[in-house]
Image (cartoon, rainbow, N blue to C red):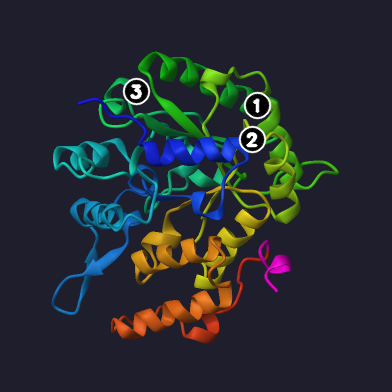
């Protein structure tokens, strides 16, 4: 069976590149690839059936993927290769318009399993998944990089990315590029971090030919100014998307998608903000409503808590706390 990028995603990308998109074309990806970095511990806890809790299994995690795909709320389902193979074996994508995507590299800065200390150091390029195997169940993959303003580290990262692009082209695999902020303080001279990251991205991609370029970016939201600068730089060739980061409050989740769209971003790729929500489907439904400006972020939080109450689901935080913006980068544009 040939697996391709679904028309739903291709059509949205085409309208975005042409500048003909509407808020309904905003792309949402469910990032359920946490096993690639955190192992069992990254999948959280689930009810054991006797009032106790147990560690989630791969079966639990993949069942959540299927529920999300069946909802029709997301455009992309990002997984590990092992999960992608399992979903395809079960026929999960056969009648779905959700595009499967596979994480194609796992540098050491995402190794956050229990007891591990790898994230305290700079990333060393590493790639587990074989592209020929990944291509059997996906035509789209994620490749991630981190820039440190360190010549040797950044050259090693760029060389690994160049080698990946060559092999991805040979395998017929398209990709999107994830750009992490460094996990520790970094000297950017007299520039702020957002400016450094923006310039590093543009410099990285300026010499990349069209057939090797990422379809879009996945990066940390570094504030309104940085998002607007990068999103307006070359919108026909560089579509900017945002990663979710830590779970945060529900208001954080809605503010992040609202501000991303308002300042030119066109993609949101969320992991913990979806998976760790009390009701994953309802939080994504409201994300779409916020992006499409059918509801404001404050009212979306209230609506979410109303849905939890109706479903007899206990919220992780009281409403008053969940209405707060806890992420400082979001606060200036939240009121």
**Label 1, residues with CA under 10 Å away: few <14, some 14-19, many ≥20:** few
Q: Answer yes or no: do the residues labelled 1 and 3 have beta carbons within 8 Å?
A: no
Q: Residue at x 42, y 62 (%)?
A: 284
Secondary structure under the numbered disc 3 in the rendered image? helix
Placement of the N terminus among the 4 image quadrants: top left
In magenta segment, residue 333: yes
Give the label on residue 131, or none.
3
Q: Mark 2 highlights which residue?
A: 147
Q: Is residue 63 visible?
A: yes
Q: Earlier in the sequence, mark 2 or mark 3?
A: 3
Q: Considering depth in this image, is 265 or 273 the residue closer to the camera? A: 265
Give the label on residue 204, or none.
1
Q: Answer yes or no: do the residues labelled 2 and 1 have beta carbons within 8 Å?
A: yes
Q: Residue at x 36, y 17 (%)?
A: 171
Q: Earlier in the sequence, mark 2 or mark 1?
A: 2
Q: Residue at x 54, y 79 (%)?
A: 299
Image: magenta residue range: 329-335
């Amino acid at each position: 069976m040939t697996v391709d990028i679904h028309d739903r995603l291709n059509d949205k990308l085409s309208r975005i590149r042409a500048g003909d998109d509407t808020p309904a074309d905003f792309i949402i990806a469910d990032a359920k690839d946490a096993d690639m970095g955190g192992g069992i511990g990254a999948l959280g806890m689930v009810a054991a059936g006797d009032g106790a809790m147990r560690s989630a299994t791969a079966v639990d995690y993949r069942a959540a993927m299927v529920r999300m795909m069946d909802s029709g709320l997301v455009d992309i389902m990002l997984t590990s290769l092992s999960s992608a193979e399992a979903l395809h074996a079960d026929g999960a994508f056969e009648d779905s318009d959700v595009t499967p995507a596979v994480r194609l590299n796992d540098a050491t800065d995402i190794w956050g399993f229990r007891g591990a200390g790898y994230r305290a150091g700079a990333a060393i390029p590493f790639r587990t998944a074989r592209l020929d195997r990944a291509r059997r169940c996906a035509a789209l993959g994620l490749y991630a990089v981190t820039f440190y303003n360190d010549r040797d580290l950044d050259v090693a990262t760029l060389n690994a990315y160049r080698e990946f692009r060559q092999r991805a082209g040979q395998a017929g695999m398209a990709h999107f590029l994830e750009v992490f902020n460094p996990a520790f303080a970094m000297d950017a001279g007299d520039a702020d971090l957002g400016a450094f990251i923006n310039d590093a991205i543009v410099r990285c991609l300026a010499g990349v030919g069209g057939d090797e370029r990422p379809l879009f970016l996945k990066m940390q939201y570094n504030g309104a100014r940085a998002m607007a600068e990068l999103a307006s730089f070359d919108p026909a060739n560089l579509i900017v998307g945002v990663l979710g980061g830590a779970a945060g409050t529900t208001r954080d989740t809605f503010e992040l998608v609202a501000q991303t769209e308002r300042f030119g971003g066109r993609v949101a790729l969320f992991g913990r903000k979806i998976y760790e929500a009390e009701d994953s489907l309802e939080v994504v439904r409201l994300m779409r409503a916020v992006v499409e400006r059918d509801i404001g972020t404050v009212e979306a939080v209230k609506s979410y808590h109303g849905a939890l109450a109706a479903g007899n689901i206990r919220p992780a935080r009281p409403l008053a706390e969940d209405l707060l913006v806890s992420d400082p980068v979001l606060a200036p544009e939240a009121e």
